[in-house]
Amino acid sequence: MIPSFNQVGTTGRSGRLDAATQNRVLRNTYWMLAATMVPTVLGAWLGTVMGFSFLAGSPLLSTLLFLGIAFGFFYAIEKTKHSTMGVYLLLGFTFFMGLMLSRLIGFAMGMSNGAQLIGVAAGGTGVVFFAMASLSTVIKRDLSGMGKFLFVGVIILLVASVANIWLQMPALMLTVSVLALAIFSIFLLVDLQRVVNGGETNYISATLAVYLDVYNIFSNLLVLLMSLFGGNRE
């Protein structure tokens, strides 16, 4: 579970981009977001086929190493966001995230209705995305101030998730998933509104933030569906 990575770019004299540039950033963000789905799906498929396991024997070390690699990607992408290398690094990061998702996908596929649950999670994520995208264009109030509170919420969820590695409490897992769905849905709205309003000038940074929101919504929705409606293991 990783918070959105927000980076406010340089704006014009009025504090916002002109309409043409604003629309271009938004359009490029949507196209780049669609492109990131390809390496994500590829990584998830390869990881599932190969039985990818990221230090499964040591959950804490696995979590720390994962966060280290993820934030390393964040730093590199931000440093190269104005070049083609930033695009390659972003796609590489999404492939890595697909690999990390493969264990959850593999567990779901082991259920009698796993394929259906994955489909419902993907469809539900799409519904949330289009709902937040629509709201981002009609809500006039600036929501950027919510970012700090949402970030605190994500940190609390991250601590609870790590603690549950040892506690193994199903109720805590469900609570974390429900709260994560709410927090990252609002994060998605905030990140999309920032692009719509011209607060973000770089489509690579914008795509990274929105991708993380979508990724967390999908993975937590899938966990919730498996917990509530998962069939018997095959």
Image (cartoon, grey):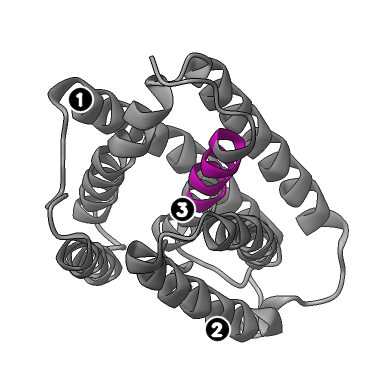
The three-letter code of the residue at mark 2 reads Val
Foreground tag (3 vs 2): 2
The three-letter code of the residue at mark 1 reads Leu
Residue 69 vs residue 227, the one in the foreground: 227
What label does residue 46 carry, if any? 1
Q: Position of residue 136 (x, y in %)?
A: 77, 57
Which element carries disc 2, helix, strand or loop? helix
- Residue under label 2, please give it: 152
Q: Main secondary structure of the magenta part?
A: helix
- Residue under label 3, please give it: 207
Q: Name which quarter of the figure residue 48 lies in.
A: top left
Q: Position of residue 91 (x, y in %)?
A: 27, 43
**Range of the magenta residues?**
216-226
3 or 1: tag closer to the N-terminus: 1
Residue sitting at 59 percent across and 54 percent down? 174
Image position of 122 with respect to 65: above or below: above
Image position of 150 with respect to 100: above or below: below
